[in-house]
Every structure is written in structure tokens, then in C-alpha cells.
Amino acid sequence: MKNLLYITFILIITSSCSEYQKALKSTNIAEKFAMGTELYDDGKFGKANRLFVQIVPKYRGKPQAEKLMYMYSRTFYEMRDFYTANYQMERFVNAYPESIKAEEIAFLAAKSYYFLSPVYSKEQKETVDAIGKLQGFINSYPDSEYLASANTLVKELDYKLEKKAFEIAKEYNTTGPYSRDYQAAISAFDNFIIDFPGTTLKEDAMFYRLDSAFKMAINSVEWKKEQRLKEAKSLYDTFVKLYSESKFNEEIKSMGEELVTQMQPYSSKS
């Protein structure tokens, strides 16, 4: 019985492959369309794509073209060829703006770029492009059923840009022991706080900005030290006011005590 089932299974597979190969070689575009649709519905997107590639130009202007182009563009998405998926999906939306599938395809076109976004430590051009694509979708379809998903994706991509900018600024503070650039760190964190006012990394940014100002001040040449200590103290006061229960409380307390000690000689002068 088991052998019979196995043989039957092999015959079905062989027959299926034979029909597919026959459709690939056929000059009958209707046969290719039918087979491609069947494969698409079965989730065999690679095989369906090979058939659709052959017939897309021949269906241009025909009633079936919209359905074909919908499936064709989706096959690239399902095959994770996101560059081509975006291109083909944008073509679909431009060609069939009134299609009931236009909104879905417009969202997937933008989402394709989301998948192209690299980890935050790498160059973020694709991330910026993805945000632009998703924001374009949000603007075009403000009442879309995909709006919440699009906003979530934008939020994730925004965080990558925040994390990238934060880590660059932090690197000025932490790279060492001889190449730390505290002034550059302060400037970078100033820019970060301005560029990302709602960031979840604000407390960290303000701490490392203070830490950079503090270390620059206490290690400063004498003729710059008083002014730098005052600037560090100002950042210290701001931080304590904003984050009285900070996760950095131990380090902050130590800085505050050291600043008081370091500033005493200048207090006695005045």
C-alpha cells in the first residue's frame, strides 16, 4: 500500500512538472495565464513569475491585464525581490489608479522599501527612501486600512535614523583612550536633541552631552577651565531638573560633587 501511495505521489508530481514545462514552452498565452494563475493561487510564486514574465507584454491593453499585473507584481514581493516589487507595484498603481487593488499594492510597494532598510550601523540611504515611500502612501491614502501598519513602519525606520545619529555622537565621547573629541560630542548631541525632539534616547543623549562637557572641563587647560566648568554645571543643572530619577543617578551625583570641588578655587577668586 505504501509503495502504491508513493508511486501515485511521484506520478502526480511528474505530471505537474510536465504540465508546467509544457506551459513554459507553449505559444498559447491563455494556457500560460491559466497555469500561472493556478501556481500563484498555490503559493508557487517563482514558477508563476516565470510564466508571467513571458506574457505580460502580450496582455498589454487587454481586459485581463490588470489581474495579470497584480499577480505579477505580487510574485516579486513574495519572492523577496523588493527592488523589482516596488518598481512593478508602482507601475501597477500608475496604470490602474482606480483599481480595487491599488491601495493594497501602493502599500506593499512602500513596504518593499522597508525591507531594504539595513541595520542602523550601516549607511541609511534606503531607510530615508523607505520613510519617503511610506509617507507618500500615508499622504495618498489617509483613510487606508493599512494606515496603522504604515505608521508603525515609519516609526521603526525613524528609530533607526535616531539610533544611527545617537551612536555617531556617542562615539566621539567613548572612542579612546586618546582620540576622544568631547567638543565634537557636545555639538553632535546638541544637533541630535534638536533633530529628534521626541526621541526615546533623549535622556541618554543629554547624559552623554553632560558627560562630554564634564570630562572636557576637568581635563581642560587652565585658561579655559573656569568657563568650561560653568558650561558643564549648567548642563548638569538642566539634566537634574529634567531627570530627577535618572538611570544615571550614580554617575550624575559623582559629577555634581566633582564639579563643586573643581569650581571652588574660582569661587574664592570672585
Image: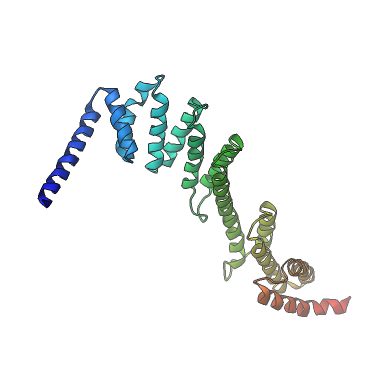
Quadrant in which the C terminus is drawn: bottom right
Q: Position of residue 170 (x, y in %)?
A: 60, 63
Q: Is residue 19 toward the left or the right of residue 261 in the image?
A: left
| Residue in the picture at 65% in, 66% down | 208
Quarter of the image holding residue 67? Answer: top left
Quadrant assignment, res 27? top left
Q: Quadrant of residue 165?
A: bottom right
Taking the image as shown, residue 84 lies to the left or right of residue 181, namely left
Q: How many numbered circles are shown?
A: 0
Residue drawn at 27 percent across, 26 percent down: 31
Above or below 208: residue 38: above
| Residue 81 coordinates in the image, percent (x, y) | 40, 41
Image position of 36 with respect to 253: above or below: above
Work out which residue is located at the far front of the displayed protein and give it: 1
Left or right of 221 in this view: 78? left
Pick out the residue farthest to the right: 270
Residue at image coords 20%, 30%: 22
Image position of 54 with respect to 61: above or below: below
Tell me, yes or no, if residue 138 can be seen here. yes
**Is 149 positioned to the left or the right of 231 in the image?**
left
The answer, for residue 182, to whether it is visible in the render is no
| Of the pair 262 and 121, the residue shown nearer to us | 121
* Residue 74 percent location from the top left of the image: 41, 37
